[in-house]
Amino acid sequence: MDGAQRLGFYRQMVRIRTYEETIRGNYHADKTPAWDIGAGLIPGEMHLAAGQEPVAVGLCAHLRDDDAITGPHRPHHLALAKGVDMHRMTAEIYGRVDGLGRGRGGHMHLFDPAQHFSCSGIIAEGMPVAVGQALAFSRKGTDNVAVAVAGEGAANQGAFHEALNLASLWKLPVIFIIEDNDWAISVPRDSSTPIKSNAPRGAAYGIPGERIEGNDVETISDACGRAVARARAGEGPTLLEIHTVRLWGHFEGDAQAYRGAELAVAESHDPIPIYEAKLRAEGLLDDAGVAAAKAEAQAEVDAAIAFALASPVPDPSTLSDYVFA
């Protein structure tokens, strides 16, 4: 992996973090002093992925525009790394007509046909969908791959097991990625899952499984690259569980009192300053490079938010448009 690619990883992670930090600030700005989740320019729940950027960046380094991803309810990092248009994505989050779903889906339901990207608020919902996408690619005879990304709690859902079973039976080009951030909302992993890793579950379906520790973008990229190459070569599915970290609450407004001292430990494992320090130590990054990456990211984010705010809200008279009768 050359220096240019490694710097690209860093800039992409900074870009994603800058986006979510800015969205977070705007989301909170008009919901106080009395917290009102339905108030403000961005009403409703908001699930952010700070700390999980290495998963998206390491994975998407190996995907093309015509490969498919199904994401979970915490999707922004994956969407941005895959190449979803930031302007239209932001307009969708703000509920505006120029959004990906004309302002009707919100942040948990982002659909971009150009990037074959989708996500859902239903746990594990995207796993069977990715199997269907992989089946379509197989029937067409292309070398495209589909990827299903879900949290560790999704591995206890029936859809997880059904998807792995069918993908293995038909030897489909699909990669299942579990983002293990240790928490399913407020439930610690050890209280919901009797095994320390979901990777061995692949063996029950004849699928190779691997758990990646460390939340390091280069290690993740290496594992994802092998899985994608295997799928493109017609060798079937792979299950990867990536141990990552959730720095912020399950949703914005979550005080996280249930995490106790573990939260400070998680914050000390923030992958961006850790990777920045690594690149600095190897002479690939300096103060000017850091400042440039942050400034470039902020300018892009600010432009996307300006685009969203300039877009009108949907006309109430169009409420029934785009709905199957």
Image (cartoon, rainbow, N blue to C red):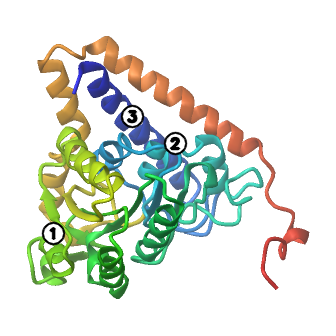
Label 2: how many Cα within 10 Å (few below 14, some 14–19, many 20+): some
Q: Is residue 3 left or right of residue 31?
A: left
Q: What residue is pinned by disc 2? A: 83
- Work out which residue is located at the far right of the displayed protein and give it: 317
User: Residue 72: x and y, percent?
Assistant: 43, 66
Between residues 197 and 99, which one lies in front from this camera angle?
Answer: 197
What kind of residue is marked 1?
Ala
How packed is label 1: few (under 14 Cα within 10 Å), some, or many (20 or more)? many
Nearer-N-terminus badge (1/3)? 3
Q: Which mark is residue 12?
A: 3
- Horizontally, is 237 left or right of 292 in the view? left
Closest to the observer, 25 or 123: 123
Quarter of the figure that contains the C terminus: bottom right
Marks 1/3 in contact by CB < 8 Å: the verdict is: no
99 lies above or below 318: above
Query: According to the image, label 1 marks what residue?
Result: 199
Whole-angstrom CA distance, mark 2 to mark 1, is 28 Å
Q: Is residue 77 visible?
A: yes
- Cα separation between marks 1 and 3: 27 Å
